[in-house]
Amino acid sequence: MKTFIIMICVACSCVCAYGQTIAHPWSVQDGGGGKSAGSGFTLMSSVGQPASGTITGTGFVLEGGFIPGLRQLSGSTSSLDVAVASAWNLLSVPFVTDDMRKTTLYSAAVSNAFAYTPSGYVVKDTLQNGAGYWLKFPSPQVVSMTGTSFAPETVDVSAGWNLIGTISYPALTANIVALSGAGITSPYFGYTVSGYYSEDTLKSGFGYWVKSSGSGKLAISTAPLIAPRAATSAAVLKNVRSVQGKQSSSFGGELDGFQQLHVHDVRGQERTLFFSGVAENIDVSRFELPPVPPGDMLDVRFRSQRVAELAGAQGKSEFPLQISGAVYPLTITWDGANDGGTYTLLVGSGKEKKEFPISGAGRVVLTDEDAVVKIGITSAQHAEMPKAYALYQNYPNPFNPSTTIRFDVPKASNISLKIYDVLGQEVETLVNEERGAGRYSVNFDAGNFPSGVYYFRIIAGDFSDVKKLLLAK
């Protein structure tokens, strides 16, 4: 095979990209970078985005690691390895093949292939290019495909959410153009076992969600000719892992100041919700998530289909949660700072309704699958200041291993809140500082204490009160 050298000059700077041969193949990842296996050649910056795999054509063979930005390979034979998780995956067919049946393309899948239409999910036996599909696999593995590559391409979309596939080569979302009445109104969402996350580059072989304001087409083209910067494969993988499951990254950091509620099921799956009674001038419609995945993957969102809610001008509001695909019991945790708003976790089951103040660290175990779970939010500007000191009975009581203690402070005061055993010996200090006027709650974690009766006492100015609590392990 002949070795070739490509010289690219930009602003009088010369970048050398040595073509690969069998003697020195290289592997290219997102953003560039890569080192040849022979002859000491180093690829200083890649042109385009990641390689699809082995390319064959008349008179040449390029092993995985070619420079995709320089190719016009529509009609050539390509191959691609796609790593799938032991769970539900969003996938698409990146090539044109002679047999587009799901059983041929994804023979190891243990589910049907689910496409999405305006009326909901539908099962597809024969798959199409440009569409995305949900498929479940029994174990982590690599799916290998070979076929005729295609690029650029247009994808049909309808008003609302669309599950799309991509072309044979990676494409930057910033370069996708809406045509013929379509309008992009959401980030592009991919999916991992950690949940939905926003994506800036559509990768070959995967499926993505996007919301459109109308019916039309999306024109998808390959990435720019020269990548903005080089990056090692290790750095790329680290960057990808850093955004998985972190919904705040999907919305440009707008959720950084929000309180967080974490929901875990017994399989170790976790999802996070965001809420605030303080944030202003934020359009909550931006926080909408794509449709709920099929099957048994944990999905937690507000009933509004958003990942975040804001009390806003309403002052006091209750926002129900929608939980699906969970294996109970669920553990709900929070570690929110007191930002002036008042937050409560409301759990209703039958005629019983429990309230758990959300302030500081807290934890609730939910065993009833039919329970209605809500977050109550009172914004800072609508929160009523207490008129007198008060110490409330802890909840729950009896407890194991943690409980919440609430108290009211009508004016700035030095607050002392301590725990004592039955002998009157101090065993824990919960608060010992000046607090401004407001309603407070603190968490007492007695995981390291033996079962028995304890007391908690508050001293605030001239006010003092004592109540009893019971730890039952």
Image (cartoon, helix red, strand yellow):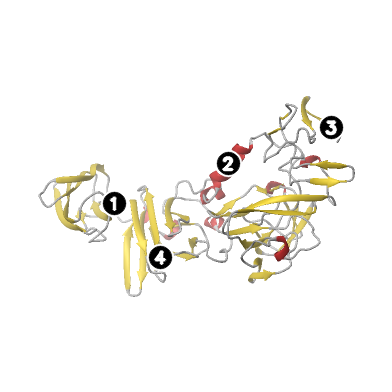
Q: Is residue 29 above or below residue 187?
A: above
Residue drawn at point x = 43 percent, y = 57 percent: 264
Q: Which residue is mark 3?
A: 3
Mark 1 or 3 closer to N-term? 3
- Amino acid at the residue labelled 1: Asn
Q: Quadrant of the C terminus?
A: bottom left
In space, the residues marked 4 and 1 are separated at their CA atoms by 20 Å
Q: Is residue 62 above or below residue 443?
A: above
Which comes before the other along the chain, label 2 or label 4?
2
Q: Nearer the viewer, mark 1 or mark 2?
A: 2
Residue 443's disc number: 1
**In the displayed structure, would residue 353 be above or below residue 130?**
below
Say which residue label 2 marks: 239
Badge 3 amino acid? Thr
Where 308 falls versus 347 (above or below)? above
Q: Nearer the viewer, residue 466 or 463?
A: 466
Q: Nearer the viewer, mark 1 or mark 3?
A: 3
Where disc 3 sits, the SS reads loop
* CA–CA distance in space, label 4 to label 3: 64 Å
Q: Are marks 4 and 1 in contact (CB under 8 Å)?
A: no
